[in-house]
Amino acid sequence: MSAINDVAIITRRQLLLLSRVPEVLIFSTIQPVMFVLLFRYVFGGSIATGQPGGYVQLLMPGIFVQTVAFTLAGTASGLAEDMKKGLIDRFRSLPISQSALVVGRTLGDSLLNIVVLAVMGTAGYIVGWRPSSGFASIGLGFIFLLFFGYALSWVGVLVGLSAKDARVVQNVSFIVTFPLTFLSNAFAPTTGMPRALQYFAEWNPVSTMVAACRQLFGLENQFGATAGSFPSEHPLITSLFYMFVIMAIFIPLSVRKYRNYAD
Amino acid sequence: MKSIIAHDLVKTYDKGKVRALDSLSLDVEEGTVLSVLGPNGAGKTTVVRILTTLLRPDSGSASVAGIDVIKSPEKVREVIGLSGQYAAVDEILTGYDNLVMFGELYHLGKKQAVVRAHELLERFSLTEASKRPIKTYSGGMRRRLDLAASLIVKPKVLFLDEPTTGLDPRGRQEMWGVIQELVKGGVTLLLTTQYLEEADQLADEIAVIDTGKVIARGTSDTLKKQVGGERLEVVVEQAHVAKTMEIVAAVSHNKVTLDEGLRQISAPVSTGSVALFEVLKALDSAGIHALDVGLKRPSLDDVFLSLTGHVAEEKVEEELGKKKSKEKAK
């Protein structure tokens, strides 16, 4: 089908861009690796987890989720950049599937995530991360992470296409993703937060994703999950639900925005 | 056969407050070049964006190569080429990569896309730079590559939106050469520009637009006639201005104008070089040495000024000055 072919060409362009500017790949992996090391050695010593293997076991799923959440910013700023240069006009005037550019962009960004997750996983292993579940379960955990990144990438499409200025995009994306990743169970137990925040943190998709990954990587300890709360007890289902909802809302909105973006 | 027809196009922004296009109509005969000429904000880019399916008009209709732009945009995209105001190519990729990618997006297949990329690079003198990223290209090279990208599958109708804006004079000359070559190949071309000289050089017909409407159209000659015939211009020393004005008035029988700063006296004349000769003779017998004498056909700048009551852009003054001195040099 030619639509699939179009998407493949655009995705390949993303990869070609990466190979021409290896700095992008290097910096997209340095930052999460730096986070792994910082959190592991700065907080790791002082946060009591009661977890065999220590803080790093709880930390890694948290950092994985945070990293894929930043896909939103990557997609958004990439698109805003294309728009600024007039590339989107060029693509839209071609006889190709009208959503090929955005679909290709989101897929390309997800492929980048595979590389980033692989590097982070290796770094984590070096500093003591040992997922204790089986191969299939660990693999499923990574598929969950990629899927979550992909869903957020579509939020990024809408942010990128809506922004009037490429410089704003980066800021907006961080304002959205930073609090979401910290108001969660990713780095510290939610039990220490004020009640209202704790409630928010429980339902935060980042928390449910982190909890889902911890479960898939074989951890019993859910880092202060509130007993009896639905998202804490059923993180897999809740996360899946969130991902489908995000895509069900943002894919149609983004594609529509792309088609009419100049109107 | 008309290749492009736009009928009563209206496009407003900000909930109707800004009228970018105000019932604009135009058409272009197959195989000819129409230049849409107007200042910034006149609506040039909006017309191009509607005709290339990037934008929907609020009302009105348009067709390109006989295909309805609003009803069958995907079919229109198959027969057009668009090169916009910004060189819309991937800066990080090489010229070659860009062309192959666009070729594949036009469904040429990898092999054919590679062949076509080499052909176009050769044709636009970019072969040497083909393996360099676009960000190392000069402005003119980027525009040529952008144009090449719009020619990958020979389009029936080509749209060039301000193809030389921002280029230095040399880049502009090169681009003109490339466009003239294209036109010889028989493509239908709609070109927007705010350079009056450019429209004069490249177009068979010119549509002058201002505030979203076509305010005049015709060949460059017809438009020039609208502003009247030739003008005689004489520059003399300050001491001789008054006497020279008398002489010019006697020959021209028309209103004589004086530019005090330039000490330039000018007046419309109907007899061309005869009038020029008469004035020179009269000046000679009055013992006045003219610093500069010339006959000037009205420029498109004059056309624009007389049609709209305002100059096309700030730069016009400067360009007018340059053009005058060039013509006088001849």
Image (cartoon, grey):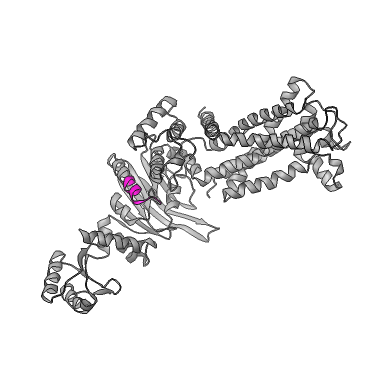
* Residue range of the region highlighted in magenta in the rendering: B166-175
Relative depth, front residue between B137 and B23: B137
Residue located at (87% from left, 35% from top): A48
> In the shown orientation, is residue B124 left or right of residue B277?
right
Measuring from the top left, give residue A144's x and y in whole percent. 71, 30
> In the shown orientation, is residue A173 left or right of residue B299?
right
> In the shown orientation, is residue A134 left or right of residue B277?
right
Q: Quadrant of residue B318?
A: bottom left
Q: Quadrant of residue B270?
A: bottom left
Measuring from the top left, give residue B303's x and y in whole percent. 31, 62
Instruction: Work out which quarter of the rendered image holds the N terminus of chain B and state it.
Output: top left
Residue A236 in sight = no
Q: Main secondary structure of the magenta part?
A: helix
Q: Is residue B169 magenta?
A: yes
> In the shown orientation, is residue A170 left or right of residue B145?
right
Relative depth, front residue between A99 and A113: A113
Instruction: Work out which quarter of the rendered image holds the C terminus of chain B and state it.
Output: bottom left
Measuring from the top left, give residue B81's x and y in whole percent. 40, 40
A259 relative to A237, above or below: below
Residue A12 in sight = yes
Q: Quadrant of residue A181?
A: top right
Relative depth, front residue between A202 and A117: A117
